[in-house]
Image (cartoon, rainbow, N blue to C red):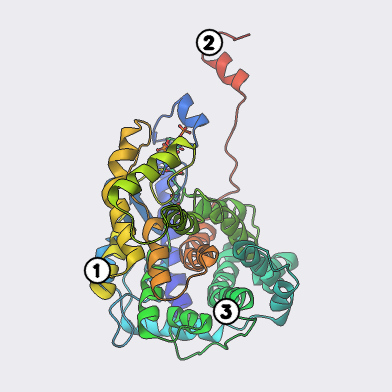
Amino acid sequence: MDKLKEAFAKKAASEAVNVKQFIAEHGDAVVGEYTVAQVYQGMRGMTGLVTETSKLDPEEGIRFRGYTIPELREKLPKAPGGSEPLPEGIFYLMLMGELPTQDDVNDLTNNWARRSIVPRHVFDTLDSLPANTHPMTEFSIGVMAMQTESLFAAAYKKGINKKDYWDYVYEDSMNLIARLPRVAAYIYRRKYKNNEHIEPDPKLDWAANLAHMLGFDVFDVQRLMRLYLTIHADHEGGNVSAHSTHLVGSALSDPYLAFAAGLNGLAGPLHGLANQEVVAWILELRKELGGGLPTKEQIAEYIKKTLAEGRVVPGYGHAVLRKTDPRFTAQQDFYKKYIKHDDLCEIVQMIYAVAPPILEGTGKIKNPWPNVDAHSGALLIHYGIVEYDFYTVLFGVSRALGVLSSLIWDRVLNSPIERPGSNTTEGLKKKFGAVKQK
Ligand code: HAX
């Protein structure tokens, strides 16, 4: 048994007892009430899930096991000479509930390197896809092709005891996380770099190895990749990618099937695909204005035009947050600290100055502030990763850390199959005595 798994097994056993006891003692306590509007409008604000790895506060932003992003940038272990946290550290924190030591993180790097071999048939599957397949579709198909490797599915077929589910889900999740950078890089190199692939370097940490396999063996890109893969990892349980992974996993679909479902949700333009949409939107704006740096007035006009066309301003708004996303702020800080000047990043800052009052002025957008996706593309483009329809794949690599550590906890806590109730409009109207409209 690997060192992390051994430590986790102890933690998991005691926490499973704690939770059982909590449900026994407080199972009848009322969590909250909800309204007809909430039932129709995406269940906003209804607590209907338990997610141990992180918690989102509308005003403050995300905390991973109690730690904010600025705290994690300071406290999580770094690569030698590095200044941004290693994503291995946030995975450890989310899984174990405590900050890792440098040794814990180094062990995890080695653990994932040992597990990182991707079976040949996965590449063959990707090679068979038409050139115009979207990278997120390819990524999801790549994960599905790897499902042949699921130890959970194989063990379940043989017949396993419920109490051992988490063990196989842990193994699948660790293998999957270890292999995702290779699959992502394969998609990138096949699509944009003449199908010329780069072998992994097992001496590199998880994020640096991804940068290496993409073809960017420079310190600056490694540094960005470490931050990127840390801050995109998790955003509590109700977002589409986390919830889909949890939901599909609740049917005891294995981690490959569950994570592919999460990726398919992440690929939507209102969720993870917004990172590609932001760049497309800014490039469209620049093209329309004939290139160069736009003025704030021109940006304001462009935002108004986008709204008038019934489109969303990508990178702005959030279903839970009611302030600037700290993941945006972390990237803004990265820009100011390490890059200092870049035209596209400057446009991002100008949009930040101009967009919120306009969005607020509509009177209906609940959060006029930027989210994580408003900044990420500009940083990647600065370093030469310009193929923006690939960006959501990078988000997906990172998101695996959160949703898969949650999935392991789901099996530890014996979460049942998810099955909320639904009603018809007629049923609801009847319940509340509404008059039938003809
Ligand atoms: N531009 C234009 N209109 C917007 C808007 C935006 N950025 N954000 C919200 N609205 C609109 C909604 O479409 C909705 O309009 P209707 O009443 O006409 O249907 C109205 O304002 C109220 O919406 P809301 O309650 O403020 O927001 P929701 O919780 O319904 O939606 C979204 C949250 C993130 C989906 C939304 O803000 C949006 O579409 N933003 C742009 C896309 C985006 O950046 N997505 C990424 C979000 C973060 C994330 O998941 N990253 O992966």
Residue, disc 1: 336
- Residue 423 position, x and y percent, is 60, 27
Separation of disc 3 and disc 1 at Cα?
Answer: 31 Å
Q: Quadrant of the C terminus?
A: top right
The residue that appears at 59% across and 80% down in the rendered structure is 193
Tell me the crowding category of disc 1: few under 14, some 14 to 19, or many 20 or more residues within 10 angstroms, Cα based. Answer: few
Is residue 250 in view? yes
Residue, disc 3: 182
Q: Quadrant of ligand 1?
A: top left
Q: Is residue 160 left or right of residue 309?
A: right
| Residue 340 found in image quarter | bottom left
The residue that appears at 30% across and 43% down in the rendered structure is 356
Position above or below: 176 against 325: below
Rendered image: mark on residue 433: 2
Secondary structure, mark 2, is loop
Viewer-side label of 3, 1: 1
Q: Is residue 75 left or right of residue 40?
A: left
Separation of disc 3 and disc 2 at Cα?
Answer: 57 Å
Is residue 47 in view? no
- Residue 320 position, x and y percent, is 38, 44
Viewer-side label of 3, 2: 3
Q: Which residue in the rendered view is the most extreme toward the front?
A: 290
Which one is nearer the viewer's eye here, 400 or 222? 222
Tell me the crowding category of disc 3: few under 14, some 14 to 19, or many 20 or more residues within 10 angstroms, Cα based. Answer: many
Separation of disc 1 and disc 2 at Cα?
Answer: 58 Å
Q: Earlier in the sequence, mark 1 or mark 2?
A: 1
